Image: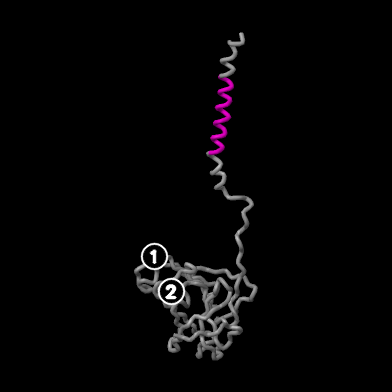
Amino acid sequence: MRHRFEKPLRAAMLAAALLVLAGCSRTLLTAPELDRQPSLASPAPTMQAVVPPPPGVLSMGSIPAADSLLNWVQVTQVLVAQDAQMAVTGHRYALDFEKGSLPADELITIKDYDPNVLDVQFGPHGLKFGVPVTLTIDFRGTACDPGAARYDGSEPVLYWLNDATNQWEEVPGHTDWTNMRHVVRLQHFSRYVLGGKAGWKQSPNRADDD
């Protein structure tokens, strides 16, 4: 009688063991998938502080307050080929690319928050050039324009925002007074502000112009 139930009992025990083993194997296979899921405890992205334009920024109207949130709007978006020699323009800005400026084809953007304030972002942000890109800025109607009602004798000077220090640093350039244009050679893309030298407060040391 005992021998009659031994075989079914052994078969049931074997089946149970196989089920347990299969469950363990399935857990081992799916665990890496779970590890790749984002953690609910992951920290939120760090929000960068808003950096306002410095005193002296050239404009044809009011300048945003120091605590203003700047709403950057895309003015231009143009695909520039790596070996192309072409210009990208938007509002008061013109970017002239030479052959060899870009390491690859790039979607070039120009953004500002007010067309009357000479505060601009060029993108892709941080892009570096093999051959410098020429930036030309039209400053007619500002405090640097001798023909403007708001003229105060200022000389235009371009600054870029150093993301590592949150400080404005000068970009050497020259002024075309005949056409009221300020011209510089950019080594990289960033945020740039054209200011009036006479009214610039607490500005960094001025480098020698080319």
User: What percent of the width, then of the height, locates residue 116?
Assistant: 54, 78
Determine the image quadrant of residue 72.
Answer: bottom right
Q: Is residue 104 visible?
A: yes
SS assignment at label 1: loop
Q: Is residue 22 magenta?
A: yes
On the image, numbered disc 2 is attached to which residue? 89
Quarter of the picture holding the N terminus: top right
Which amino acid type is shown beneath numbered disc 1?
Answer: Asp
Q: Main secondary structure of the magenta part?
A: helix
Q: For residue 16: magenta?
A: yes
Residue displayed at 59% across by 70% down: 70
Frontmost of labels 2 and 1 is 1
Indicate the amino acid at tag 2: Thr
Q: Residue at x 54, y 35 (%)?
A: 26
Compare residues 34 and 189 and report the one nearer the observer.
Answer: 34
Give the CA distance from mark 2 to mark 1.
17 Å
Q: Name the image quarter holding residue 151.
A: bottom right
Across and down, in percent, residue 51 comes to: 60, 73
Question: Which residue is situated farthest in the front direction here?
Answer: 3
User: Is 133 situated left or right of 155 in this image?
Assistant: left
> From which residue to which does the magenta span run?
11-28
> Where residue 200 sits in the image (x, y, percent)?
58, 85
Can you give x and y, in whole percent of width and height, for residue 170 in the image? 52, 81
Front-lying residue, 18 or 192: 18
Give the residue displayed 46% in from the left and 83% down from the top: 173
**Mark sitting on residue 197:** none
Tell me the number on the disc at residue 105. 1
How packed mark 1 is, by other alpha carbons closer than 10 Å (few <14, some 14-19, many 20 or more), is few
Is residue 79 shown above or below 19?
below
Q: Which secondary structure, mark 2?
A: strand
